[in-house]
Image (cartoon, rainbow, N blue to C red):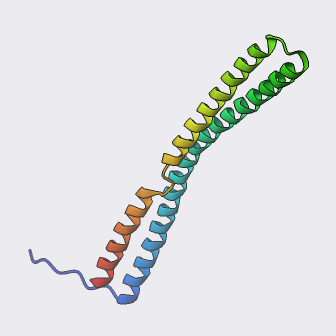
Amino acid sequence: MIEVAPEPRPLRELVSDLAAQTGVLIRQEIKLAKAEVGEKAKLAAKDVALMASGALAIVLGSAVLIAAIVLIVALALPLWAAALIVGLVFAGAGAGLAFAGYRSLERLDFVPRQTVETLKENRAWVSLELAK
């Protein structure tokens, strides 16, 4: 049996197919980028919540420290020492939480690396298709 080579497709048809495939590819890349950024946003939200918890603890600690100062001035009794210790504990815990959230947020990479990589691959593919 003799094999017959397929007829070459017209350039207009090739360009039309390439445009259609490129459109599908771009839509898929947009979906991937949205998913990747959404995942990173969830991680960032957790870090922001940690920082907010730390800020709340700092505010509470500050309120206790103010109460300690008031007690020192108003009564000049040993009761102020207890308020001062509690205030320092709250402020220290809050500072630790806020710093932990900040450090975690600082390490988060917001660049959609997978999308960038596939876009490079797609560009190379399109270049090859156009060179044919």
Foreground residue among 72 and 16: 72
**Residue 88, image quadrant:** top right
**Residue 13, image quadrant:** bottom left
Foreground residue among 67 and 124: 67
Q: Quadrant of the N terminus?
A: bottom left
Residue name at image x 52 percent, y 52 percent: 35
Residue ranking furthest to the left: 1
Residue 109: image location, x then y, percent: 48, 52
Q: Is residue 123 above or below residue 13?
A: above
Left or right placement of residue 73 versus residue 32 in this view: right
Residue 118: image location, x then y, percent: 38, 62
Q: Is residue 108 above or below residue 10?
A: above
Residue 63: image location, x then y, percent: 80, 28
Left or right placement of residue 97 versus residue 61 in this view: left
Residue name at image x 79 percent, y 16 percent: 80
Residue ranking furthest to the bottom: 11
Q: Is residue 40 above or below residue 130?
A: above
Residue name at image x 76 percent, y 32 percent: 59
Residue name at image x 44 percent, y 73 percent: 22
Count every numbered label the image shows and give the total.
0
**Residue 54, image quadrant:** top right
Left or right placement of residue 13 versus residue 92 in this view: left
